[in-house]
Image: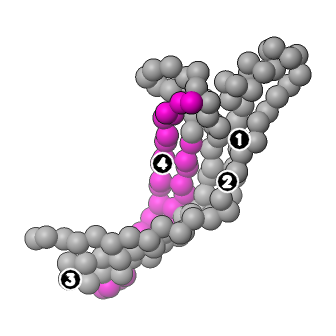
């Protein structure tokens, strides 16, 4: 088994009203084949997903409640170290499985102490 690196990048825009923030963004999540530091030989299912991510935030005086819903546009399970080794040993191209969510609902809250 392996403890792989993970990457997440989000770019977007926000429109603010008196009590609400409305946001729209593009989200890129990745589990790379190789780690930046350390060994990369353990089992993992590398791949990436690109999502459209609308969101809304409701603001009170010191409390904010938000919901972000990334919706998958592109999903790609890239070849893993195990796939490469199996292909080399058997001579038969191997590309493992993966499962990606169609959407995720992220709900949270923040409290400002000042």
> Residue 21: x and y, percent?
38, 76
Give the structural element (helix, strand or loop) at label 1.
loop
Q: Residues within 10 Å of mark 4 (few under 14, many from 20)?
A: few
Q: Is the C-beta separation of discs 1 and 4 under 8 Å?
A: no
Q: Is the C-beta separation of discs 2 and 4 under 8 Å?
A: no
Task: Please name which of the two marks, 2 or 3, marks the residue nearer to the observer.
Answer: 2
Question: What residue is shown with label 4?
Answer: 9
Q: Earlier in the sequence, mark 1 or mark 4?
A: 4
Q: Quadrant of residue 86?
A: top right
Q: Earlier in the sequence, mark 2 or mark 3?
A: 3
Which quadrant is the C terminus positioned in? Answer: bottom left
**Alpha carbon distance from label 2 to label 3:** 38 Å
Residue under the point 60% across and 57% down: 51
Question: What residue is shown with label 2?
Answer: 100
* 35 within the magenta span: no
Residue under the point 26% across and 84% down: 60
> Residue 81: x and y, percent?
67, 24
Task: Please name which of the two marks, 1 or 4, marks the residue nearer to the observer.
Answer: 1
Question: What residue is shown with label 1?
Answer: 77
The boundaries of the magenta stretch are 1-30
* 3 within the magenta span: yes
**Alpha carbon distance from label 2 to label 1:** 9 Å
* 19 left or right, relative to 77: left
Residue under the point 70% across and 25% down: 82
């Amino acid at each position: 088994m392996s403890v792989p690196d993970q990457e997440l990048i989000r770019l977007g825009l926000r429109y603010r009203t008196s009590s609400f923030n409305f946001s729209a963004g593009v989200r890129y999540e990745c589990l790379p084949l190789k780690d930046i530091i350390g060994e990369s030989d353990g089992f993992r299912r590398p791949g990436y997903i690109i999502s459209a991510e609308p969101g809304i935030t409701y603001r009170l005086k010191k409390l904010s409640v938000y919901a972000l819903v990334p919706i998958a546009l592109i999903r790609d399970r890239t070849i893993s170290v195990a796939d490469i080794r199996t292909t080399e040993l058997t001579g038969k191209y191997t590309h493992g499985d993966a499962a990606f969510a169609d959407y995720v609902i992220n709900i949270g809250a923040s409290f400002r102490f000042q």
